[in-house]
């Protein structure tokens, strides 16, 4: 790449966070909060100590798993909005797999992780079948299945899986410590969970960029009719893309059960599926920026807890910053594309 082109690309990449910073200042001013101090509180709230960094990693892992999974269907131009429900089904299958055991070990944990992946994959395949055979747009089917998954979770918690003698929003009975994922010393995160997230990203990167299957999936996304003529089996590849994405989403749900909450909760997904969609859009669904954006969002998520404590701001302000970041990326990308078209037209 010529030096001038590299410099231009770098400047455009820096333009998005710069615009986001300006918009954040404009949004923060009416609330009376110092904008720079607000950003400082967010950053230090997530990175100010090792314990806080451990909490950041607990957010980073499921977010990374979901974001890595979403790269697969998007290669075929499919919007797997149902990733949120797939996380929930992964948590349900994981919890169900451990119900017969009072105690366990590595084999039981591996079984629960596999069950979580199976649950997420099956839920994603349902959306895929509705898309490929029922001609139901994946956005509508995904949103519908998300609500069904949440309803199923609440029914299980207050019904068949309720705690002995009481059923409450606090979730099912806590798993025995022998069924928990290992931890990084005193940190809240797990080495196993972090390794799974890294392996998932590498797997997706290899599949999409180094295999014939990934090339075929990209062809399906660009021109399904031509892919059908060249016998690339668009329906089969779409279903495979949904299944792989759902499996990684289900794995995120299993990690939430085994490594974070140690039981099934009504809000077990913590909205990470929807946040992962923002990560993908901000990364333009490219692989390399995904872990860095996931880490950024994880810091905002954990750091937002300090906003009401130190600045009397609602913790939802971090969500505003996330939205502004995505908006800034879209604005700068659109402006760049417009300038390129205008330059070429001249």
Image (cartoon, helix red, strand yellow):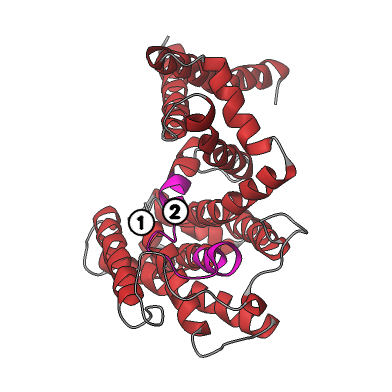
| In this rendering, position of residue 69 left or right of residue 144 | right
Magenta residues, dominant SS class: helix
Counting residues from the start of the chain, the first of labels 1 and 2 encountered is 1
Which of the 4 quarters of the picture holds residue 296? Answer: top right
User: Which region of the structure is painted magenta?
Assistant: 253-277
Which of the 4 quarters of the picture holds residue 27? Answer: top left
The quadrant of the picture occupied by the C terminus is top left
Q: Position of residue 118 (x, y in %)?
A: 48, 76
Residue holding disc 1: 224
| In this rendering, position of residue 18 left or right of residue 126 | right
Q: Is residue 162 above or below residue 20?
A: below
Q: Nearer the viewer, mark 1 or mark 2?
A: 2
Residue holding disc 2: 270
Q: Are marks 1 and 2 in contact (CB under 8 Å)?
A: no
Which structural element holds mark 1?
Answer: helix
| In this rendering, position of residue 11 left or right of residue 73 | right
Which of the 4 quarters of the picture holds residue 160? Answer: bottom left
Q: Is residue 338 magenta?
A: no
How many labels sit on residues?
2
Q: Is residue 263 magenta?
A: yes
Numbered mark located on residue 240 in the image: none
Q: Residue at x 64, y 75 (%)?
A: 177
Cα distance, mark 1 to mark 2?
Answer: 35 Å
113 or 240: which is nearer to us? 113
| In this rendering, position of residue 116 left or right of residue 51 | left
Asked whether the viewer can see residue 210, the reply is no
Q: Residue at x 31, y 60 (%)?
A: 146
Which structural element holds mark 2?
Answer: loop
Q: Position of residue 148 (x, y in %)?
A: 27, 66
């Amino acid at each position: 790449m010529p030096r001038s082109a590299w410099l231009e690309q770098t400047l455009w990449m820096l333009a998005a966070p710069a615009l986001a910073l300006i918009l954040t200042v404009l949004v923060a001013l009416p609330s009376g909060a110092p904008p720079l101090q607000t950003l400082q509180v967010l950053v230090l709230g997530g990175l100010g100590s090792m314990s806080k960094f451990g909490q950041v990693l607990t957010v980073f892992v499921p977010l990374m798993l979901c974001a890595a999974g979403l790269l697969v269907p998007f290669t075929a131009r499919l919007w797997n909005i149902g990733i949120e429900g797939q996380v929930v089904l992964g948590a349900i299958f994981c919890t169900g797999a451990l119900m017969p055991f009072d105690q366990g070990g590595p084999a039981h944990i591996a079984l629960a992780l596999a069950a979580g992946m199976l649950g997420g994959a099956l839920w994603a395949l349902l959306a895929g079948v509705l898309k490929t055979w029922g001609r139901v747009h994946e956005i509508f089917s995904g949103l519908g299945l998300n609500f069904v998954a949440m309803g199923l979770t609440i029914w299980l918690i207050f019904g068949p899986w309720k705690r002995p003698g009481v059923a409450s929003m606090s979730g099912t009975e806590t798993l025995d410590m022998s069924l928990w994922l290992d931890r990084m010393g005193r940190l809240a995160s797990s080495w196993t969970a972090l390794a799974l997230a890294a392996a998932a990203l590498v797997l997706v990167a290899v599949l999409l960029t180094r295999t014939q299957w990934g090339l075929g999936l990209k062809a399906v996304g660009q021109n399904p009719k031509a892919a059908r003529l060249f016998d690339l089996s668009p329906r089969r590849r779409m279903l495979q893309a949904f299944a792989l994405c759902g499996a990684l989403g289900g794995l995120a749900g299993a990690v939430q059960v085994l490594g974070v909450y140690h039981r099934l909760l009504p809000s077990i997904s913590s909205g990470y599926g929807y946040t992962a969609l923002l990560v993908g859009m901000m990364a333009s669904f490219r692989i390399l920026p995904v872990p860095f954006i996931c880490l950024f969002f994880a810091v905002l998520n954990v750091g937002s807890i300090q906003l009401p404590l130190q600045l009397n701001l609602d913790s939802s302000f971090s969500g505003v910053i996330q939205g502004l970041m995505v908006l800034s990326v879209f604005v700068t990308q659109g402006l760049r594309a417009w300038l390129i078209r205008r330059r070429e037209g001249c």
